[in-house]
Image: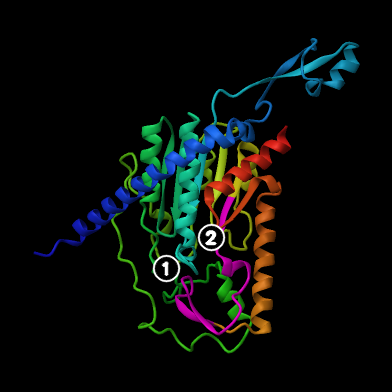
Amino acid sequence: MNRSPERAADSAVQSSSRSAFALLRRLEWRVRHAVENVLSGEYRSAFRGRGMEFDQVVKYEIGDDVRDIDWNVTARLGEPYRKKFVEEREVTLLLVFEDSPSLQFGSSTQSKREALLELAGLVMLLGAVNRDRVGYLYASPEGYQLREPVRGRGPILHAASTLLGVPPPRLEAGQPDAAAGKADAGPRPQTPAAAAQTADQPPVIGREDPAASPPRPTAAAPVKVSGAPVDTAANSEGGGSQTEIPWQLLARAAPKHSILIWLSDFPPREAPDGWSVLQRRYQTMGFRVDDPWERALPAGDTLVAYDPLARRLVTLDGTAAQRAGHAEWVDRREAAFRDLFPDSLSRLVVSTRETRLDALVRFFHARMRTRH
């Protein structure tokens, strides 16, 4: 007897969730070992700093940190005064995972999406081990889901396994709008292969070859979080490749001075509306995973790659025009990333061939050395 599509989708989601939970259990031991033996207090120091909230000005006493002296008040009153800060009792981590068809690319054994999800899982486990509050917002061209910050190993593990178990967006979600009479929505994200190929004519292998295209994943049932299904209202018309992130909702999703970590492919684009407001409210960081082919086109023979955004095959034969187009795309992407996160210590870029936990350890080491 054939199972109904709904049961098949539910079974696929359950299987994906079990696999995600098994992965998290394997990662948890590595995270605990890193926190206890490598990171020690550096994870917390890298986030917390010397104080999060200014409280008041008080008289300076022997033993107080001279860096806290308020020289304006001291000069006005004729005796030393210092600024008093109230230390936050806990850190709240809010992850924003921006999923897109372009993340499904991988020139080796692991796709960028798998590596970025692993990075997200490691950060959430770090929060659990350090008894912080952790939440996330998952957004894709098909909708979004929000899990409010929770505390405790069990709830955070459940939230992380739910995030890692979300099926990838359909490749159809990355195709250009084809509806008759539909207005152009403006410039769309572009993959490095497409950027290189656009710079060199002739075009890709003529027309789209359905037989050569990879199989398209079937639609999965929406993942429910806290009883609320994925919100697809922002993408109800379908066909667009843009991921709509509800930034106004995020502005109210966590307490002030929380840590907002945006995990994305970060294609060249403008900053979203309201980004400056979020930067004032939260400590913002950007985490990105790169494939080696994004950093430099492969040398050697002609290669054929599938562009998940354009839904077509592209030919990479290493011509000077292709490499110039690729280099220009890389420059625009890096410039846009720096504009979003001007502080170099708020940006983390990891290769798919790099150990994600080692990259996180180096990231926290660098932040701690600068903050102290």
Please count the marks in the image: 2
Q: Is residue 288 above or below residue 195?
A: above
149 to the left or right of 86:
left
Does the magenta run of residues contain 37? Answer: no
On screen, residue 73 above or below 150? above
Q: Which quadrant is the N terminus positioned in?
A: bottom left
Displayed quadrant of residue 217:
bottom left
Q: How far apart are marks 1 and 2 (CA)?
A: 32 Å
- Mark 1: amino acid: Gly
The label nearer to you, 1 versus 2, is: 2
Q: Name the residue under label 1.
A: 239
Name, please, the residue furthest toward the left. Answer: 1
**Residue at horizontal 69%, vertical 27%?**
50
Q: Where is residue 341 in the image (x, y as percent from the top left)?
A: 66, 49
The kind of residue on which mark 2 rests is Arg
Looking at the image, residue 74 sits to the left or right of residue 174; the answer is right
Residue 171 is drawn in which quadrant? Answer: bottom left
> Please, what secondary structure does the residue beneath circle 1 have?
loop
Crowd rating for badge 2 (residues with CA inside 10 Å; few <14, some 14–19, many 20+) = some
Is 39 in front, or is 228? 39
| Label 2 SS | loop
Give x and y (percent) for residue 12: 26, 56
Q: Which of 203 and 76 is in front in this view?
A: 203
| Residue shown at the point (23%, 54%) measured from the top left | 11
The residue singled out by tag 2 in the image is 353
Q: Which of 317 and 281 is in front in this view?
A: 317
Give the quarter of the image for residue 346. Answer: top right
Residue 291 is one of the magenta-drawn residues = yes
Q: Can residue 249 be seen in this view?
A: no
- Write down the region rendered in magenta: 287-315
